[in-house]
Amino acid sequence: MAYQKNSIPLDVCWFIISQLKTKVSYAKIVKEVQRNFGKSVSKNGIYKIKKKYDCTGSVVDRPKCGRPRKLSLSQEREMVQACINNRKLTANSIARNPKLNPSGIHARTVTRLLNKNGLKDSIEVPQQIS
């Protein structure tokens, strides 16, 4: 099943469950949700919420599969903002800075993050002493 951006808020889901427990019809629930919350919910959406509640005992989404993210969104924003404020920062300097990189991610991951946000990055190459 694909991720839905317009998912139903939890307070609406719990309202639907409470209405279903009092044996209210699906059509009346659709009207009540529209009137009370200003959200449009289909009868099929109500059925899926009821099915989720019956299977899990809750309407909260279960954890999704896949590898966990290395950085939180706030850490990503902090790195990008630091790079915007100081254009001389490189991926290696960000990756080595414990204040900017508490997770200890690799410089290549920082490069990908900066490129994803439309910033050019220059990974500094260690200079050899001659």
Image (spheres, rainbow, N blue to C red):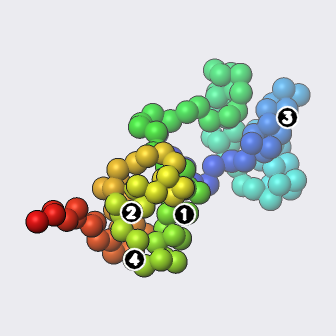
> Of discs 1 and 2, which sits in the foreground?
2
Circle 4 crowding by C-alpha within 10 Å: few under 14, some 14–19, many from 20: few
Residue 97 is at least partly visible in this image: yes
The label on residue 88 is 4
**70 above or below 99?**
above
Image quarter in which the C terminus is found: bottom left
First in sequence: mark 4 vs mark 3: 3
Q: Residue at x 53, y 71 (%)?
A: 81
- Check disc 3 and report the residue beneath it: 19
Residue 31 is at least partly visible in this image: no
* Kind of residue at badge 2: Ser
- Check disc 1 and report the residue beneath it: 77
First in sequence: mark 3 vs mark 1: 3
> Of discs 4 and 3, which sits in the foreground?
4
Cα gap from disc 4 to disc 2, whole angstroms? 9 Å
Query: Based on the displayed image, in which of its 4 quarters is residue 18 positioned?
Result: top right
Dot 1 and dot 4 residues touching (CB under 8 Å): no
* Kind of residue at badge 1: Arg
Dot 4 and dot 2 residues touching (CB under 8 Å): no
Circle 1 crowding by C-alpha within 10 Å: few under 14, some 14–19, many from 20: some
First in sequence: mark 4 vs mark 2: 4
Cα gap from disc 4 to disc 3, whole angstroms? 59 Å
Instruction: Point out the residue furthest to the left here.
Output: 130
Q: Residue at x 40, y 55 (%)?
A: 96
> Of discs 1 and 4, which sits in the foreground?
4
* Kind of residue at badge 4: Lys
First in sequence: mark 1 vs mark 4: 1
